[in-house]
């Protein structure tokens, strides 16, 4: 969506970029623990996808690269950006 809005750009077609991601970054699967935790997060106004992303980062004890104010203001995890 950021690419469609012109907020980010890619040197290759987006589909090619996305297909290449797993070779450079691990793709973390959602599991029942993550899905369950996502529903319990105290992030006012966060959409379901944001909740799953935060829950996944928490589950794997990883920082999250985001500037989404609802996530950064929640102080649930360390954010980078």
Image (spheres, rainbow, N blue to C red):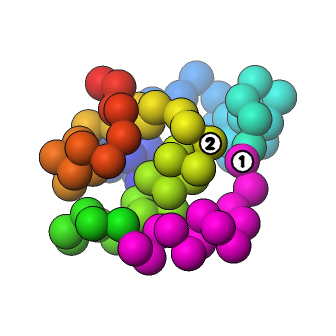
SS state under label 2: loop
| Location of mark 2 (residue) | 60
- Residue 55 location, x and y as percent? 50, 57
Q: Quadrant of residue 44?
A: bottom left
Determine the CA span between mark 2 and mark 1. Answer: 9 Å
Q: Earlier in the sequence, mark 2 or mark 1?
A: 1
**Which quarter shows the N terminus?**
bottom left
**Residue 49 visible, this angle:** no
At 62% from the left and 42% from the top, the residue drawn is: 60
- Residue 75 location, x and y as percent? 24, 44
Q: Quadrant of residue 11?
A: top right
Foreground mark, 2 or 1, reads 2
Q: Are marks 2 and 1 in contact (CB under 8 Å)?
A: yes
Residues rendered magenta in the picture: 28-40
| Location of mark 1 (residue) | 28
The one of 56 and 46 positioned closer to us in this rendering: 56
The one of 57 and 49 positioned closer to us in this rendering: 57
SS state under label 1: loop
Q: How many marks?
A: 2
**Which quarter shows the C terminus?**
top left
Mark carried by residue 7: none
Q: Is residue 7 magenta?
A: no
């Amino acid at each position: 969506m950021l690419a469609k809005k012109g907020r980010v750009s890619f040197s290759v077609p987006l589909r090619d970029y996305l297909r290449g991601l797993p070779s450079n970054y691990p793709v973390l699967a959602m599991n029942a623990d993550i899905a369950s935790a996502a529903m319990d997060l105290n992030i006012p106004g966060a959409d379901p996808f944001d909740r799953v992303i935060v829950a996944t980062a928490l589950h794997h004890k990883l920082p999250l690269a985001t500037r989404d104010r609802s996530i950064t203001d929640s102080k649930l995890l360390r954010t980078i950006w």
